[in-house]
Image (cartoon, coloured by chain):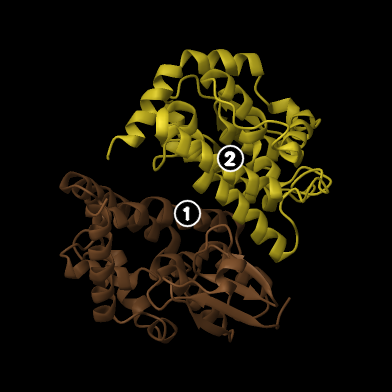
Amino acid sequence: MSATVKLIGFFDSPFAHRAEVALRLKGVPYELILEEDLHNKSELLLKSNPIHKKVPVLLHGDRTICESLVILEYVDEAFDGPPLLPVDPYGRAMARFWARFLDDKCSKPFWLSLWTEGEAQKGFVKEIKENLKLLEGQLVKGRKRFFGGDAVGYLDVASCGFAHWLPVFEEVAGVRLVTEEEYPDLCRWAKEYASDETVKQCLPDRAELLAHFTARKDFFVATAKAIMAPN
Amino acid sequence: MAGGELKLLGTWASPFAMRVKLALNFKGLSYDNIEEDLRNKSDLLISSNPVHKKVPVLIHNGKPICESRIIVEYIDEAFVGTGPSLLPADLYERAIARFWAAYIDNKLLASWFQTFTGKTEEEKAEAVKQTLAAAEHMEAAFKECSKGKPFFGGNSVGYVDVTLGSLVALVRTSETYDFKPFDATRSPLLNAWLERFAALDAVKTVVPDTDRLVDYAKTRLAEAAAAVSNN
């Protein structure tokens, strides 16, 4: 199908990056539509993703696909080019398992380890560090260059937040989670990922991310408080 | 890769294990059903799912696959020649199916469980509100996916039917607490679909008995409440 491809994203979003890098890895030409302010979402975004109202959204002809991991699988299936997911069913199940692990088990403790304090923070730091160790294990003690093997694949793309965004958040929050000593394979992978020829074309500029997140630090702390509040 | 040995680690009460049983039943695949005692997890469960230590786990030729939706996709992909396909053939419809399956777990079920486990009356009331809103979206999803046919998968049961239909026992349990997210007035299509789904032989053989489930839920909730008040 040679219909137009558009991607609604936002410069600071690792989820939007997942979708964008997938299109680039498959060599698909696309138009990038950047939201200017996620506190003031565009008509197009609200109309295209009424359920979640989030980026990324892929518009392929008259098709609308939401949710970054769903978009990844759609892009893998809809377009020619190197496969993002493994071809064998078991490999696919493993890749999906770990991507889901990231979103379901890592996002929250990661976020809260940055912006909470005291005993609560210690708990979240412990949790995210344990989970990152499990993720690192998938690199099989350095025997794999990428989660996908020799080339960037689905799980590498899904893990992009921990490659490029994590160090920026660490700097803004003044919290250190990942050191080369403790996570040699994960750190090596992060460098490989961020310096991949295709990936680096759509990674946001680090200095811009840093400035943007620093300006929003109070807001981030407030979101952490809101998550903790019900108790 | 057809054939081979299939073992399912699950429990009679788990809607997640039920998804896998449904998928196996609909595909006409025989398997060894191993009932786990979640208070005394087997070595096999812990070694097969070291990350989450949860059911269900499907073990195919000795290799474990975890997470119910991932297992269902695995079954569909590994046994592509056997029985009907659960994921749609059309790749856009496949993306839509994956979107709604994720929504069921991340939004619908998450708030539904909160209606039982919420710590305050406000929390529970908010959870009820969110569950009803999610049910409304699922009603629209049914319209979109079924296109006038009896199931989300069209004329035959598909991935979303299995994902949502496994909640039939939860629906019946909730009714004893006077909570009906899929009632005939608010969600007529889903209400009818659920009746239709529950009447299928493949479903009847694996759905937990409602009375047994209500007793089980009462015991679990009482234990949880006691645990909280003992802290």
What residue does disc 2 label? A129
> Which residue is located at x 23 percent, y 66 percent?
B174
Q: Which is more toward the observer, A90 or A222?
A: A222
* Pointer 1 chain: B
Residue B157 screen position, x and y as percent:
47, 73
Q: Which is more toward the observer, A123 or A146?
A: A123
Q: Residues within 10 Å of mark 2 (few under 14, many from 20)?
A: some
Q: Which is more toward the observer, B63 or A56?
A: B63
1 and 2 marks on the same chain: no
> Which residue is located at x 21 percent, y 66 percent?
B184
* Pointer 2 chain: A
Residue B62 screen position, x and y as percent:
69, 75
Q: CA distance from mark 1 to mark 2?
A: 26 Å
The answer to whether any part of residue B19 appears in the image is yes
> Which residue is located at x 34 percent, y 83 percent?
B199
Q: Residues within 10 Å of mark 1 (few under 14, many from 20)?
A: some
Quadrant of the image containing the C terminus of chain A: top left
- State left or right for residue A169 relative to residue A137: left
Residue A24 screen position, x and y as percent:
73, 36
Residue A133 screen position, x and y as percent:
64, 45
Check the rendered structure and report the hue given to chain A.
Answer: yellow
**Of the residues shown, which amino acid type is indicated by label 2?**
Lys
Q: Which mark is residue B21?
A: none
**Of the residues shown, which amino acid type is indicated by label 1?**
Ala
Residue B148 sits above or below residue A126 on the image? below
| Quarter holding residue A226 | top left
What residue does disc 1 label? B102
Q: Secondary structure at mark 1?
A: helix
Q: How many circles with numbers are drawn on the protein? A: 2
Residue A87 sits above or below residue A34 on the image? below
- Shown in brown, the chain is B
- Nearer to us of marks 1 and 2 is 2
